[in-house]
Amino acid sequence: MESKKELEVKTGLCMSCHHETCILQFKIRDNEIIDVRSAPGAPYQYVPNQGRSCSKAQGLKGLRNAPGRLNYPMKRVGERGTNKWEQISWDQAFNEIADTLRRIKETEGPEKVACIDGAHNEVWATSRFFNLFGSPNLDGIMAKICKGDVRIVNSAIYGNTIFSAYSEPPTERCKCVILWGAKHSTSSPLRWAGEKGVKERGGKIIIIDPRGTDEIKFADLWLQLRPGTDTALGLGLINVIINEGLYDKEFVEKWTFGFDELKNRVQQYTPSKVAEITWVSKEKIVEAAKMYALNKPGSIPWGTRCSHIGRNSTDVERVRCILRAITGNLDIDGGDLFQSPYPGVVTAQELDLAEQLPLNQMEKALGADWIKLKSAPGWKLLTETRKAGGLKAYPSWGTLGAAVPDIYYSILEGKPYKVKALFTVGSNPILTMADVNLVYKAMKKVEFSIVIDIFMTPTAMLGDYVLPGTAWIENPSIQWIEKTEAILGADRILPKCSDGEYDRRDVYDVFRELGLRLGQDQYWSWKTAEEVLDHRLERLGVTWEEFRKKPWATPIGIKEKSYEKIGFATPTGKVELYSTTYEKLGLDPLPNYEEPPESPISTPRLAKDYPYILITGSRVREYLHSQFHQIKNCRDKHPDPLVEIHPETAKKLGIKEGDWVRIETKRGSIRQKCKLFENIHPIVINAEYGFWYPEKAGEEPTLFGIWESNANVLTSMAREHCDHACGNWYLTAMLCKIYKDKKL
């Protein structure tokens, strides 16, 4: 009888939520995870020292051999969408892809190759390749509606970025937290544990959200606003703080620019006026403003939902930036601190090589004529002021890129030029981007399509080459916890290759091999991801082999008020309440509210046929966007897509708990299962997004059921609906109808 292989125990940083970085302990036998739990003694974990972990972490036990997992490079041999493939070698894949890219670059221009990037460990490697290749047309979910827009706006207003959005909880000095469009009990449990600690110490919690999430049980105040009116609410809060003299006069006088202009602007947004716009009573608006201003230090972490409201998206972040600044909650312990990488570590922005992309190529980025802040002039202004302020420029992934809608429009319309080749890396845009019909048509029409992913997704089904990537448990990594500057690291939990079973490659491997074939040899001298980590740690005098033996390092302490020594890396050297960068780009230098593109007010005739307001994008614990639907543990716990409906609305429409219903906008309709939910306004409907059916047929016309329950069938990527500073598309606060589905 063959004896069981020896049990291994490894410690790793969980990236299942992408930014949470819980520290987990894995028990492994024969390359299979047989147990996963929080690492004993780790400084940052989901439930400290309790041996517990969330459902996504438990799902990692089945990730290596999950159904649909990609194992070898595949080349399409039938029509797109017919699910006919030929297994090929990596050398064949690299050679054929590189030959096509070389031809396009030499005959058409490098800008004719574009990329939709997603959530994976080596985002910088994708940027590095495209900057060296000469194409500015790289963008995606993370760079637009998941942190990227926040980085850009923060950089314009502060010259740096607030990073109270990730796993680090508020410190013990924090006395007030505003959770604005953030459901941290689901999306950031580490941070939520710390936020509950604020309450336990006698501090305040304010919730701003159309939905009464689990957090309202702990809240001192819940502002249940009308979807899409966040900017108006924020301007109303600023109005109260300024007019009642609750602002930090010393900080405002010494460290802000444009206070008088801001004061004049917010006079339009009285509590009474804002109450009419937002549905939040003027009394609650005043109470919330006072609660935040008088309970210092306070924190306003980033919330994803505010990035989903199209044309108002970046102005929500502007008002949050302003609220932090005028109350003196900026860069102080217990408030919101600036990004501060662990000293000595080579950062992703240094690896990105944005400076290698010539300015004349930057200017060719699709959509540069209308996404002003995320265009070449915006990138140039932000980079110059950051460097003048002693800070390094942001990587092009965060600050420079194309307008995602224009990548797809370019493929379909050929204006201002036609994208010929499209990479999709660690992303599933047919599920996760607005306007599925637009994305689908472009994916069908593009001349050459390469998809890098860990699963055969609906998007991959429409590729020409599908390359098997590695999941985070198969990658080495380092992360740092921004506020405390603790550096964390983890070796590969599982191998990326197994003879005779699978041959997967890191994203770094893929772009390195393509770069070597396309004349980028000098920039890809590190042969492996481990060698890259050696380089990133060399200033600390430690190798990756040495560092990985200790999965986390001792925090070196909180630093605050860096601006007192160097000022702010903005053109005025101050927090720009009135943004000179916005002004130079032809944008309104002060935040202002616009009515959502579809609402009972802006489109009353449409509201007659579509009387409800649809919101999408809320998180569920078992999934991250469209990920983990193939994992049995996750799917068993959340088998169906759910739409939240107020009980009064459901009764009026003859709908009961568990009924399948149809949700319809003027762009299409989908079906989801009714979940009665009292903590939502009777005319607001909350549809789950990212849901698909990996167990269904992958070939056309099914494509794993993307048309059945996918909320992005309902949403919009029309330019007139998008934000014109960064290009955020329109995922929420639109008009819909809902009725019982006749299909059994």
Image (cartoon, rainbow, N blue to C red):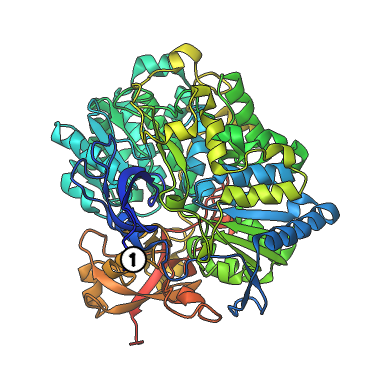
> Which residue lies at the image location 72% right of the left edge and 65% below the top edge?
413
Q: Is residue 444 above or below residue 434?
A: below
Report if residue 417 is visible in the image.
no
* Residue position marked by numbered label 1 in the rendering: 2
Density class for disc 1 (Cα within 10 Å; few <14, some 14-19, many ≥20) is few
Q: Residue at x 25, y 69 (%)?
A: 675
Find residue 696 and report its image quarter.
bottom left
- 424 vs 723, nearest the viewer: 424
Residue at screen point 74% across, 59% down: 95
| Residue 376 picture quarter | top right
Viewer-proximal residue, 511 or 213? Answer: 511
91 left or right of 225?
Answer: right
**Position of residue 100 measured from the top left corner of the image (x, y, whole percent):** 77, 60
Looking at the image, which is closer to me, 609 or 336? 336
Query: Which quadrant does the N terminus fall into?
Result: bottom left
Badge 1 marks a residue whose secondary structure is loop
Q: Is residue 446 left or right of residue 732?
A: right
x and y, in percent, of residue 291 in the image: 23, 32
Q: From the top left corner, tell me how far across and down residue 676 is, in percent.
A: 22, 68
In the figure, 389 relative to 528: above or below? Answer: above
Q: Which residue is most to the front?
A: 1
**Which is more toward the observer, 327 or 194?**
194
Q: Position of residue 308 (x, y in %)?
A: 45, 53
Q: Can the viewer see residue 742 in this picture?
A: yes
